[in-house]
Structures are given as structure tokens and as C-alpha cells.
Amino acid sequence: AQSVTQPDIHITVSEGASLELRCNYSYGATPYLFWYVQSPGQGLQLLLKYFSGDTLVQGIKGFEAEFKRSQSSFNLRKPSVHWSDAAEYFCAVGAFSGSARQLTFGSGTQLTVLP
Amino acid sequence: SQTIHQWPATLVQPVGSPLSLECTVEGTSNPNLYWYRQAAGRGLQLLFYSVGIGQISSEVPQNLSASRPQDRQFILSSKKLLLSDSGFYLCAWSPGTEDTIYFGEGSWLTVV
């Protein structure tokens, strides 16, 4: 069975600083990897995804993530954080179960942005 | 473009009362549909998924049930709510030929 670990429960950064959110996965085959963002009381919005090909993927809102197979990681980065980036971030790995693609989520990382 | 609607957005229900959350997807056909729950301070847990009308798979034993009466409609129900059913419920969908799952805005359920 697949699993996802987000080691950092809460991260605080200053506005304008760089950001890296960590994600480690466990999956027996080539993973399908995702990052979602959730603002308070809202649903989840897809930031970016990795299926195959270039290991550095670009997403919305200036985010990027790098797939490193040797480290089983898919860390999310942003060079300069904006106050509006404050939210909870979820990493997920996709796997088949029966005939439907499903996601296994990490427990999330809460991002606080200081002015 | 495709959109997903989920309602009600918020509800407060007494213990032992029934529940019905509804979700519809527009702009696509034969989607895979999902119900997730997010308990306070915890991650997301897959409750049910469906690959077609009347086809429901349950991931977690509980007093909840799901139904898919129409191609783009997914309903989460309970006959008698428990306090532990409180949480944030998210409906989601994915195209049959793509691996990305798209989420609705969620429904806050508080059981009192």
C-alpha cells in the first residue's frame, strides 16, 4: 500500500522568503504525485502534478516541485512567498484500487506567512 | 469547463438524525466520483468511490453510505449520525482517462 509523509506539521516564513515543503512517499511502482492547497474552510485546489517526464514540474501561483526517485521525495518550492500563500498544503500519491484511481494524502503542512 | 457543486455547505445535526450530502458534476460524462472526510487536525480519508451509476466501493466501515443515482450525482447519507461523524466532507471527481482528482468546496458537518 502507498503512503505519504509530510514531516513538517507547521512552517512559518516571512513574506518574500523562499519556501520548501517536504513530502516523502512510499509506493511500489512509478508514482503519480500531486500537491494540493487548502485555504481555511475551502476545498482543495490542485497546485501541480507529476506523472512522468521532466522531474521538475511547474504549477500555478509560482509553485514548483521536484521528483527525486532516489530519495522518494516530491518537495514543493516557491522562491518568494506571498501573504496569500498562507494555507494548508497536502501532498498525495495516486494509485489504482480496483478500477478507480485514488489518492493517498499526507497529513498536511500548515503554512503561516509573517508580514 | 467542468465544475463540481456540493451542498449544503454547512449543517448542524443532532445525534441520531439522518444525513444527506449531495454532489453534482457538470461538463463531463462518466466521471469517477469520490467522498472524502477531513476530521479536525487530520488529513483526508477516502470514504467511498464510484466508477459508474450504482457502483459504489467503500473504503472504511462506518455508518455512512453512498449512492450514485445518476451519472454525475453522488450522495452521501446516514440513517443515524454519531458525534464522530463530525468533520469536513469533500466530494471529488476525476475523468476516467486522467489521474487527477478535482475537489468541491466541501461541507462542514457538526453533530451535536
Image (tube, rainbow, N blue to C red):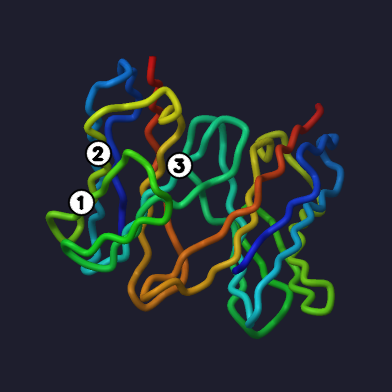
- Callout 3, which amino acid? Arg
- Callout 1, which amino acid? Ser
Q: Secondary structure at mark 1?
A: strand
**Residue at coordinates 78% horizontally, 52% vertically from top-left?**
A21
Residue placed under numbered mark 3 in the picture: B37
Residue placed under numbered mark 1 in the picture: B67
**Residue at coordinates 66% horizontally, 67% vertically from top-left?**
A58
Between discs 3 and 1, the one toward the N terminus: 3
Q: Nearer the viewer, residue A21 or B56?
A: B56
Tell me if I can see residue B1 in this picture.
Answer: no
Q: Quadrant of the N terminus of chain B?
A: bottom left
- State how far apart marks 3 and 1 are (Cα): 16 Å
Residue placed under numbered mark 2 in the picture: B77
B96 in relation to B77, above or below: below
B93 in relation to B80, above or below: below
Q: Nearer the viewer, residue A97 or A63?
A: A97
Q: Residues within 10 Å of mark 1 (few under 14, many from 20)?
A: some
Q: Secondary structure at mark 2?
A: strand
- Callout 2, which amino acid? Ser
Between discs 1 and 2, the one toward the N terminus: 1
